[in-house]
Image (cartoon, rainbow, N blue to C red):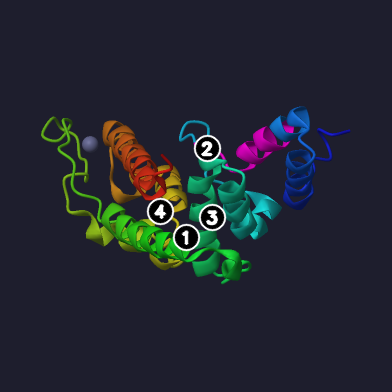
Amino acid sequence: SFYHNPPSFPAVASILRAAETFQVSRMSDFARKYIEKLFPSDYIGITWGTIGDTAAYTADAIVLGREYNIPSIMKRAFYEFVKRSSGPENDDAGIEKLSSEDLVCLARVQQMLASEWLRASVFPPLACAAVGRNRKCASHAAGLHYWDILLKDDALHKYRFDPMGGLKMLMEADWKKVGYCEGCLVERRTKLRMVQYRIWTAMDTYFKTA
Ligand SMILES: [Zn+2]
């Protein structure tokens, strides 16, 4: 069925082009909604896992989004393109299709994501309420020495253009291993989530569509 065999991005892109050409609005609406789901822009509900095979079509998505005015897919499409082209895959397939404005935008987004990840991985100390009440907690210490433990496997490099994924990894990291108490663990995770939210919201400024 459709649910178990969802159409690929190229298939739905073809449907949209045909529907627009022949002005079949119901088909066009379906294709738009489907494409919007492939590149969600809402922070809430995004898991920051991979977007699977769709990642190979981010340049096409950007072109399609410009051509048929689907602004909501831009943020995720640009993010995924930067992540993929700068990551281990080093895959910038389709970059030649992008307009010069979008290439400039791409460079700006890339720079922003890299500096945000560096900022996020410094871990400013927390003021723990439990310290001094017969309890130990290491959250007040400056965070740079956590790098070995938390940012193992070259994560600082790995997530340099994927701060959302890097922050997700840090939220799931074992902060008790570096001496955090339960309360500080929760606080750290909340702060990391706030950084994630801030970065994702800040990306809007690169895609003014009005
Ligand atoms: Zn604490």
Is residue 99 at all visible to an observer of this figure?
A: yes
**Circle 1 SS class:** helix
Rendered image: mark on residue 102 = 1
Q: Which residue is mark 4?
A: 163
Query: Which residue type carries mark 1?
Result: Asp
**Circle 3 SS class:** helix
The crowding category of the residue bearing disc 1, from other C-alpha atoms within 10 Å (few below 14, some 14 to 19, many at least 20), is: some
The crowding category of the residue bearing disc 2, from other C-alpha atoms within 10 Å (few below 14, some 14 to 19, many at least 20), is: few
In terms of depth relative to the viewer, which is nearer, 15 or 106? Answer: 15
Residue visible at 32% across and 37% down? 194
Q: Is residue 3 above or below residue 105?
A: above
* 3 or 4: mark nearer the eye: 3
Residue 29, position in %: x, y? 70, 31
Q: How many marks?
A: 4
Query: Which residue type carries mark 4?
Result: Pro
Q: Which residue is mark 2?
A: 46
Q: Is residue 84 magenta?
A: no
Query: Which residue type carries mark 3?
Result: Glu
What is the quadrant of residue 5 in the picture? Answer: top right
Residue visible at 67% across and 52% down? 54
Query: Are the residues tagged 3 and 4 within 8 Å (C-beta)?
Result: no
Rendered image: mark on residue 94 = none
Query: Are the residues tagged 2 and 3 within 8 Å (C-beta)?
Result: no
Q: Which residue is mark 3?
A: 80
**Circle 2 SS class:** loop
In terms of depth relative to the viewer, which is nearer, 186 or 62? Answer: 62
In terms of depth relative to the viewer, which is nearer, 68 or 151? Answer: 68
Which image quarter is the C terminus in? top left
Instruction: Left or right? Give the position of 158 relative to 202.
Output: right
Q: Is residue 151 above or below residue 23?
A: below
Q: Earlier in the sequence, mark 3 or mark 1?
A: 3
